[in-house]
Amino acid sequence: DTEVTQTPKHLVMGMTNKKSLKCEQHMGHRAMYWYKQKAKKPPELMFVYSYEKLSINESVPSRFSPECPNSSLLNLHLHALQPEDSALYLCASSQLPGHLTSGANVLTFGAGSRLTVL
Amino acid sequence: KQEVTQIPAALSVPEGENLVLNCSFTDSAIYNLQWFRQDPGKGLTSLLLIQSSQREQTSGRLNASLDKSSGRSTLYIAASQPGDSATYLCAVRPGENYGQNFVFGPGTRLSVLP
């Protein structure tokens, strides 16, 4: 399995809703990432989990709450979002430098979750 | 702080042309560099990865080169096809901080006209 699977593909939510985005990979990657991408812009890093621990938080507002229940799963919990949070949310995974598995260095993305906040 | 730029920002070519996309980075202390393709509204698809110790990688009609000392990488696409139309992004994986802070360039939007 060489894929990163994201659900849902599309999500529409109001500013008072609570929803979650989910991401799953079975490549044995020990680093998982959340990126936010606006139209015609490159992905912006939000969070990184390494060995299931949060290692990077790029000063993301607390209305975004990441969770890594195990080495294969990554969630992004959403609460009280603003319309400007509407974007494509991308999950990715990779192995960490120095790991011994082959093909370990590629950053692999999911298809993304398109979020619209009304 | 690592910065990545890509030129041109957009490119339109007739089908069959060979073309070169450029990526520049400011800090040569990288672990690797990866080229991606992104279709509108979709995720990123990895095309080629070049380790810092390598000079080039090839896959089909694609060839990527890396000159770490000058902070440059190029993606060469041979015999372009309309299906190659997409945005192409390069990303640098830093050599420090366990290589987690991938830095992306802004991308080159390619249109290949039939």
Image (spheres, rainbow, N blue to C red):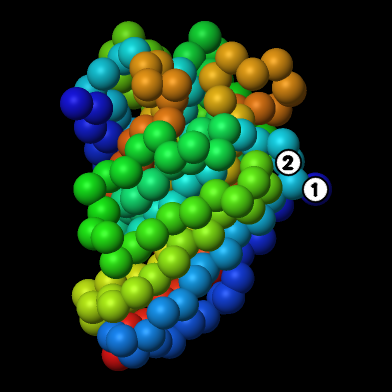
Residue type beneath disc 2: Met
On what subunit does the disc labeled 2 rest? A
Residue B86 visible in the displayed image: no
Give the residue at x 56% y 54%.
Answer: A74
Identify the residue shown where x is 53% and y is 43%.
A32
Query: Residue B30 in the image: x percent, y percent?
Result: 39, 18
- Give the residue displayed 30% in from the left and 19% down from the top: B71
What kind of element bears circle 1? Answer: loop
Where, by quadrant of the figure, is residue B83 drawn?
bottom right
Q: What's the residue at 48%, 82% (across, down)?
A: A11
Near mark 1 (Cα within 10 A), the count class, few <14, some 14-19 or many ≥20, is few
Q: In which quarter of the view is residue A8 placed?
A: bottom right
**Mark 2 sits on what residue?**
A27
Q: Are marks 2 and 1 in contact (CB under 8 Å)?
A: yes
Is label 2 in a helix, a strand or a loop? loop
Would you place residue B1 above or below residue B113 in this image? above
* Marker disc for residue A1: 1
Q: Position of residue A83 (x, y in %)?
A: 24, 81
Residue type of the residue flagged with mark 1: Asp
Q: Are marks 2 and 1 on the same chain?
A: yes
Indicate whether B101 appears above or below A79.
above
